[in-house]
Amino acid sequence: MIGIAKRHLQSVRRRDFLAGAALIDGRWVTKVSTDTVVDPATEEDIAEVSRCSARDVNLAVTSAETAFGSWRALLPATRGAILRSWARLMLEHSDDLAVLVTSEQGKPLSESRHEITYGAGFLDWFAAEGERAYGETIPSHKPGSLLQVRMQPIGVSAAITPWNFPVAMITRKAGAALAAGCPIIVKPAPETPLSALAVARLAEEAGVPPGVFQVLVGDPIELSASLLEDTRIRALSFTGSTQVGRLLLEGSAATVKKVSLELGGHAPFLVFDDVDLRKTVRGVMAAKFATSGQDCLAANRIYVQRRIYSDFIDSFAAAISKLRVGHGLDATTDIGPMTKAAVANKCRAQISDAAAKGARVFSPKLGDELGVNFVAPTLLSDVTEEMLIAHEETFGPVAAVLPFDSEEEVVARANANEMGLAGYVYTDNLRRALRLSEQLECGMIGINTASFTGPPIPFGGWKQSGLGREGSRHGLAEYMELKYVCFGDLTG
Ligand code: NAD
């Protein structure tokens, strides 16, 4: 594996994607101090990126403020045309972008390619949705008056994004902000700056004006503090852990920013005894092992009804034993390394805890020996609610299966968690599916499917999984203010 990322990066056609410069005020800024980007599979240094400071945040906000007036004044269709060009350029350069994502994030190359298509989709979708930021006319409660509600862009916005979807989490936020008429400043995760900076190159090429889309890489605490305290930033969108989300929410209070948070998940995956086992196992494999398990939608608690429990475990174990662990740039890989050592360590701690408390551990393939960031796909059966994995998000390729008896019992157990991002129900009983879609306390539910995200849907969670929504018309509204206007004395 040694050297594989470097070799692939050498073959990236767009050499400027590797320049490591930040995009501030329409200029590519190179700094003397840099941060090193690491291939998580081999722990080799693969690139250097300029480290921005609080001063750069100030410059970026000033530039965004200046750009706001002319960007919001464009016709939505004109902004949409620029977003569409940006999406097209992403697709044109998807091979290069995918190599960057896999080299710094670790996921298999096919998944990185999919992320580029998924990410470009948000730009395309919001290009059109910006034209539909309709207001309302309210039947008047005042004689001789006309009551209007308008949607107007909120102003300069900021995005703090994670490393698990380093491209799509940027375009999901930027597509909405730019379509709404707002400039946005992005602070990507320090683990995955290359793909963020490459996407910024394409934004510039697509005609996004200076100051409208800017990317600054650097110390998360320093840069976030500057973004939070700046009164000129009106909206903040964050994707990441609940722990950091809480800090950002608290930090936004002083300047009363509009905050949207996409935080951690702990998805329950409910399997009833009337299902088609083959289709269900296909679903649970996707819901658990996509992005090597580093997905906030990942099935974290797989509840299986007792009558089919042992058949399910056998089929699930057989499917898991076919997963191949390796470098994401190796075409045969299904499960890459964890992007951060902390994630791999958390997986190992959850496995040991479950084993010590009586879970059965099935881990068919070696993988851990490939490096410290690798975790072999693992099946934990007979998991109980007392085990760490039953109440703490995993974010890795470890599947926890828990038996249940009745519908009432499993709903109560599924809801007994502070997270409420996604939930899955597999059943052939329509009435039950309808009941559960109503009763589960999550922002998104897949009934007999593990695949439900995309630009038109309101992505977001209940409880401590977040605030607000991304994608869909609700995602556009996060970057807009309502304005009520009363025209009086019309009979006059
Ligand atoms: P994280 O919260 O540590 O990092 C996310 C972002 O926050 C990064 O840009 C990071 O640099 C920044 N950050 C970290 N510490 C900060 C601080 N003190 N102040 C300001 N910014 C800070 O999360 P992570 O460990 O990188 O990612 C894993 C978590 O993110 C998981 O819990 C997962 O569920 C969640 N996540 C949620 C979604 C979603 O859509 N709901 C998507 C992806 C990841």
Image (cartoon, rainbow, N blue to C red):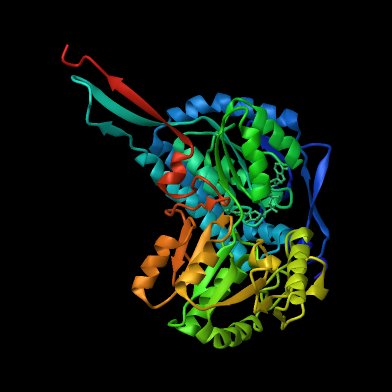
Please give the name of the residue rendered at 73% of the width and 81% of the height, measured from the top-left corner: 365
Corner quadrant of residue 34: top right
Name, please, the residue furthest toward the top: 492
Q: Looking at this view, is 467 or 169 the one in front?
A: 467
- Compared across the picture, whether 196 is left or right of 490 comes to right
Residue 427, how many percent across, how many down?
A: 42, 76
Q: Looking at this view, is 253 or 219 the one in front?
A: 253
Q: Looking at this view, is 443 or 179 the one in front?
A: 443
Quarter holding the N terminus is bottom right
Residue 434, how many percent across, how many down?
A: 36, 67
Q: Is residue 69 above or below residue 470?
A: above
Please give the name of the residue rendered at 52% of the width and 86% of the height, measured from the top-left corner: 308
Please give the name of the residue rendered at 73% of the width and 46% of the height, measured from the top-left corner: 19
Name, please, the residue furthest toward the left: 491
- Compared across the picture, whether 378 is left or right of 36 comes to left
Q: Is residue 369 above or below residue 46?
A: below
Quarter holding the C terminus is top left
Residue 78, how many percent across, how many down?
A: 42, 37
